[in-house]
Image (cartoon, coloured by chain):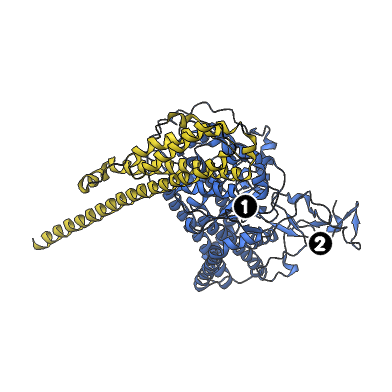
Amino acid sequence: MPCPAAFFTRSRLVTQQSVGMWELIQRNKRRSTALILTMGLVLVATGAAIGFSVAMTPEGATVGALAAFVVFVILALVAFYAGDQAILSISAATEVSHKDFPQLWNVTEEMAIAAGMPVPKIYVIDTDVPNAFATGRNPQRATVAVTRGLMEKLSRDELQGVIAHEMSHIRHRDTTYMTVVVVMLGTIILLTDAFRRIAWQTGGRGRRVSGRGGMGIVIIILVAVLLSILAPLIAKLLYYAISRRREYLADAGAIELTRYPEGLASALEKISTTPGRIESANNATAHLFIVNPLNPAESRLSAWTSTHPPVAERIAVLRAVGGTASLASYNLAFQHVTNRSGQYLIRREADSLSGKRAEPLRSQTAKQVPQTRQEREEERRKQFIGMVTAGAMLTCIHCGAKIDITGKNPDDKLVECAACGLFMPFPGSSAIMGLAAATLLTGGAAVPPQAIRKGPPPAGVPRVDGKAILGEAPKPQPDITPPKQPPADEKDSDKPEDGRKQN
Amino acid sequence: MGVIALAIIGIVIFFIIVLVLVVIAMYNGLVRLKLEVKNAWSQIDVQLKRRHDLIPNLVEAAKGYMSFERETLEKVVQARSAAVGAVGKGPAAQAAVEGQLSAALRGFYAVMENYPDLKANQNVMQLQEELTSTENKIAFSRQFYNDSVMRYNTSCQTVPTNIIAGMFGFQQAEFFELEDKEERTAPKVDLSIK
């Protein structure tokens, strides 16, 4: 499968020998700027399309574009300046000193010395689930947080590998750029969702399209509708692809610091095989953790819609690194294990080593190749659903718990609340977009599927086949108010008419 | 004729300005790398000094228990004095002496295995973590120093910047290689209780 990130390899050509961390950071900065500019254009275009469709005049387009831009700038500034503190307080992390955790502090200080950076602030999260993350807009204002579970389960070398990975994120400015990207993504989704609702309202009224500019206006409206469907999908794909690539590069940076790949490899193994989710993580902050906190042991199937590459693959690449612990050897190992072209991570002028691709090492990930055409179509469909629903969280009407509907098949028609057992109709696609936007921008933890039932479903609710089902479609309740949504205008075909008639 | 001459002069001046800017950028780059090398070296110095300061504490704590291991203790103390004496004599000279101190300390740790009481002592455990960390920090600061030296030397040798380096007298820096080959093959000692 071609990787969308291949679009971003149009950078300065360098030879294999001279690619080092400095060049890598510069190239990543350029690429990220290009990505952000692209997303910014999509954002402004969406705003213009909305503005135009509402007002039917070019001034409307300008106003729309401007409004979109202003919304984005405000959100970005807030995320940029308050983001660190927000995620730290959400995660219930406390700052620690050398006295409290001497080993952790020493390990971090050693990595700071190896990287030539000042020592970041260190926080500890009080949970048994092992994980770690880093935030901070530059190395001078950086923070690294680890969980108590991580320190208890890992040896010194493994802990050092994890800290090195996190500090690589800081060095590569991942923490800066990805925050901006996430905010952009959320804004795009929000705007396109709003646009679709407005479009139905104006379309429903059968607006008269007059005379000369008629055809042009129709085309523009069509383009706008197309944009509103494609833009969030493309933006999400870009976000996930970039996020995944940065994880690989952070792994490479980690071994460049520690010179000991096995440390990080066994740490990843331990983290991914320990069950448990971090309660306070959500889709917006997931990329900051070392292993996806929402799905630690993810398989290859979810590769497209995950912020992290499959853990087994990362471990295999780390263990395949031989010779020097440089980016070039990591890249070689990466090619061998994943069969991707060497240009995924870095682009090389002299491709003498990767010209004839060597026999790949036996990969630790079981490549699940779909056999029949039906299976292939099914997999494609699942991936598409995953893409569309990624990040959407539904609030249970009865108990208020948040349910993660990423990847859930709308054909199921019903969503079960893990906390109280209530079944609700699957929301329409427009509602899903709103939910996804809300989750990205405001955060909030989902109830894990194995959660203990908090209480029984509401008594007065009609039951069908023993399941308590509420008939009314849930209204999405994000903190940012979307435009008012009169129930009569919901014209989604995949929303069930009446929940009571299901199953 | 006058206009063409002016145009040519204008272009020539433009190119000269560009050239000057490029030269300035390269010179600044070299200066930056050289300063990074210097900074990295001072970082090593800091860690080496830290080790010098921690060792007397360890020897004091061990003296009570290890009264029969005089030789080992004395070796460590002597190696430390030699290392302190070599401070400021440059990477090559210090490398040799510090390598010997590392070897003496390794001998000391090996002997310490025979004294479980000493190992279990609270102070000694803390000191061990600090010493392990210091050894690691020395290793990592050495690594960073060598990385900086490599970047600087590369800049001094690759084509566009080597001209500038030659013109302004930038010398190549020397690597900090430990003479003690054993240090390279010794496995990392994980003294944590896991």
**Left or right: residue B21 compared with residue A2:** left
Picture coordinates of residue A470, whole percent (x, y): 84, 60
**Left or right: residue B175 compared with residue A209:** left
Picture coordinates of residue A248, whole percent (x, y): 53, 43
Q: Residue at x 40, y 46 (%)?
A: B45
Mark nearer the N terminus (2 vs 1): 1
**Which amino acid, by three-letter code, is at mark 2?**
Cys
Q: Which residue is mark 1?
A: A286
Are the residues under badges 2 and 1 in a single subunit?
A: yes
Picture coordinates of residue A337, whole percent (x, y): 55, 32
Q: Nearer the viewer, residue A158 or A230?
A: A158
Chain of the residue where label 1 is placed in the rendered structure: A
- The chain shown in yellow is which? B
Q: Which residue is mark 2?
A: A399
Q: Nearer the viewer, residue A447 or A218?
A: A447
Residue, far left? B1
Q: Quadrant of residue A209?
A: bottom right
Q: Which tint was used for chain A?
A: blue
Q: Secondary structure at mark 1?
A: helix
Chain of the residue where label 2 is placed in the rendered structure: A
**Which amino acid, by three-letter code, is at mark 1?**
Ala
Residue A72 is tagged as none
**Left or right: residue B2 compared with residue A148:** left
Q: Is residue A321 visible?
A: no
Q: Residue at x 80, y 55 (%)?
A: A417
